[in-house]
Every structure is written in C-alpha cells, then in structure tokens.
Image: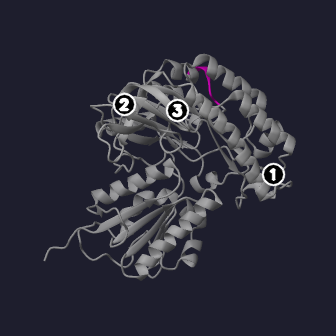
Amino acid sequence: MKNHAATFALISLGCPKNLVDSEKMAGLLDQAGWRMVAEPDGADLVVVNTCGFIDVARTESYQTIEEMLQLKRLGRLRRVIVAGCLAERDRDQLFERFPGVDYVLGVFARDEIVAAAGGKGDGSLLPERPSGRLAQKETAPFSSYPPPCSPPLSDTGRRRLTLPHVAYLKIAEGCNRACSFCSIPKMRGPYAGKPIEEIIDEAEELAAGGVKELILIAQDTTFYGLDSDGRPRLADLLRRLDDVRGIEWIRLMYLYPMHVTDELIETIAGGRKILPYLDIPLQHINDEVLKRMRRRVGRAETEKLIDRLRERIDLLVLRTTMMTGFPGESEAQFEELIEFVRRRRFERLGAFDFRDEPGTPAVELDGGIPEDVRIARRDRLMAVQQEITFAYNASRVGKRLPAIIDGRVPGQKHAFVGRRYADAPEVDGQVYVTGEGLEPGKIVDCEVVTACGYDLIAVA
C-alpha cells in the first residue's frame, strides 16, 4: 500500500517581513515533497510563524499555539512547530509554557524547517525527534537559534501566500536604529542587506511567476547599502528594479526619515514603475519626545524632508505612523502632534498607543501615561486623520486613475475590487471597479465616480 505525501498547514502572523519567511518555509517543504493544506485540522504538521513585536501580537501568537496544541491533544494534528520572532524572543520559555510543542525555530533557523519537520514528506513515518547536530539532545524537543546572517538568508524559491500578482521583496534583515521603544533588533539582529544581484534575481523570479506589483520591505529601507558599502544604495537598487521585465508597479515601504537623499528622491520621481507612494514612519514630531524615543531626527529635519518630497515628486501620497502616550508626552506635546498632522495632511496615517515592551529602554523611562489617556489620544489623532483621508478621497472624484485589480466582488459578474497606487495591500483603502474584460492582476484606467469613506467607487 502506497503512503500518501505528508501534509502541512502554515499560519503566518505579524508583518510582511514575517510573511516572506513563511513563504520560504512553505517553499522548502514543497521542494521536500510535503503537501500544503488550507486547514491544520487533520494535517501531519502545522507551522506557526509567530510575531513577538508588541503585547497584542504576542497574545495572538500564544492563543494560536494553544489552539494548535488542542488539535494535537485531540489526535487531529501530529506535530506543532513554532517559528519566527516570538520563538526567537522567548526561546526555551516556549517549551515550559507549551510542553506539547515539538520544535522551536529561531528567526535565522528558518531554512532548517525540513529537518525540524522530520525530513522529506514521502509518506514514511516521521521520526519522533530529529537527529544529528540540530537536536539539543535525543530526548528534548528540537530547537535551533543560529546567529543573525550577514548577508541575510536568500528568499528565492518561495511558495507565495499573497495574491498571485503581488509580492513582498525583503531587501534586508535586522535593524541598527535602536529606538528606545522597539525590540526588533533583539529578535532580528543587526542590519544586513542582501546583495543587489541577489535581489534582482529574486525580482526576476517573482516577475516570471506573474507578479506585477513588487513591494520593497525591510526594517529600514533607506539604510540599504550603509551596512556593506558605507553609503545609501536604495537609489541604485531602484534603478535596477525599474528595468525588471514584467514588473509594473514598485512600492516602497518602511523608509526611515534619515538617508532620504536627493539622489533617492530624483530616482523615485523619474522612475517608470516606482510609485509616488512613500511609507515613512515618523512616530512623533515634538523634539523632546523624539529624543526620548531615540529617533535621531528632529522636527526641523522632518519638515524639510516633507517639503522636498512634495516639491519634487508629482502626485505624491505619503503614509506615516504615529505613537501616542509615549512616556513623558505632555498634553502640549500631543497638541503639537495634532497641529502637525492637521497642517501636513498625510494622505495615509496610522496610529498606535505606546505599550511597555520588556527589555527595551523605554520601560525604564519616567512619566508613564495612563492607558486610558494613551488610547484617548490615539483615537483623537485618528479622528483628525479620518477627516483628512476622507477629504483626500473626495478630491479624487471625477479623476481618471490607474488601479490594479485584486479580485472579483463575490456574486457580481462585472464588479471587481482593486487598489490605486495610493493604496498598499492590507493597510490602505480599496477601489471598487465595474467594467468588462477585467481580471486579477490587470492594471486598468478608471474614472472615480464617488468616494465612500476610505474606499472609492470607479468605472473602467
């Protein structure tokens, strides 16, 4: 009797950078003969790629692990592997908290997923424990925490989990910024950029697989090149990516406000495929708050940067992120932030309230803000931003704009959902398009007929 191929399910939590790691693990299991299934119930193996960035993300990861272990206890799942940032952060504590977990892989042990899974998925009985250099000891659960890689691990050969025409391209790993509120450097290590040729090879592989929209990500994209060449090289990379055949849109995310050079601005402004959409997390605008955050960029520099970007890049859409209730933030400093947002009118803005992150310098700061005040400030800031975003969307009515089609509206023959260049997947609004001959992945010219809150309605 012939054995069936072993099956695996994958649950990816957290940010797009984590999603790329999930896609790589899925690709490696695919190549080893494992068969991916949509649901963990009934699978031989589930991989939970966790997020450990903030308390809400950690809670979600803990709950997901417990749900998978319950399936295992019921005999409906054979093995549970925990990977990703929470695995890197908590390490052996996960075994203590969740004794039913079989294997734990740190961030940089991602490529050892097949060994952790028990080898090739050819239907043979999976060993109870892996053997050799990767095991702690014969009777202990498998865990692996190699040091951060420089250059970072290759992301070619992924099994993509995004829409077929959209892909994230991770150009670097880690971060050197050491912001006082952030634990990412402790989980992801120091900054390490991929060589340009390797990034181009990956972009060409993605284009050959049908990708039209390429989204560049890193913990800090503008730092690219400084770790290896001593100078920013994002502009060099963008010029090369602009020539990759098959790619039609290049979107930039996570640009730290430092190292946005004139060369980079001119490259974005003159690019054929580079979208005039920039995601630049600012966190705050008050100089004292920024100093306590260890951001190393003050209000004057930020104002000058926004002016340069608005002056040189036509039709620019700016997205940013702000934090409310950072330790020591006074009511006057918060009002300064509100005034800044009202005046600068970011087309896209997200906000979150400060949370204590164990092991970060911010935990030791005095002047803690009560939770209800932090949340109230966040909500007030988002109310201000909502008016700005709605007004911007209303100003698009009557204009013809390109949109990329993401899918069909269920039950509708000629109605589709897509995005304009002003809308990144998952974080921004959508545009609902009616027309004939449309299909996912196609970029169409359409006329906006009405605005509906964060979304638009258009006709192709």
CA distance separating discs 1 and 2: 44 Å
Is residue 18 toward the left or the right of residue 319 in the image?
left
Above or below, 458 relative to 125: above
The three-letter code of the residue at mark 2 reads Ile
What residue is pinned by disc 1? Answer: 327
**Measured from the top left, where is residue 228 in percent x and y?**
55, 36
Tell which of 135 and 263 is nearer to you: 263
Above or below, 160 relative to 89: above
- Circle 2 crowding by C-alpha within 10 Å: few under 14, some 14–19, many from 20: many
Give the residues in magenta.
Answer: 259-263
Mark 3 vs mark 1, foreground winner is: 3
Q: Does the magenta stretch include residue 247?
A: no
Residue at the spot 52% in from the left edge and 32% down from the top edge: 451
Q: Quadrant of the C terminus?
A: top left
CA distance separating discs 3 and 1: 38 Å
Element marked by disc 1 = loop
Of the numbered discs 3 and 1, the one sitting upstream in the chain is 1
Element marked by disc 2 = loop
Residue at the spot 36% in from the left edge and 65% down from the top edge: 39
**Measured from the top left, where is residue 148 in percent x and y?**
54, 53
What residue is pinned by disc 3? Answer: 451
Q: In which quarter of the image is the N terminus?
A: bottom left
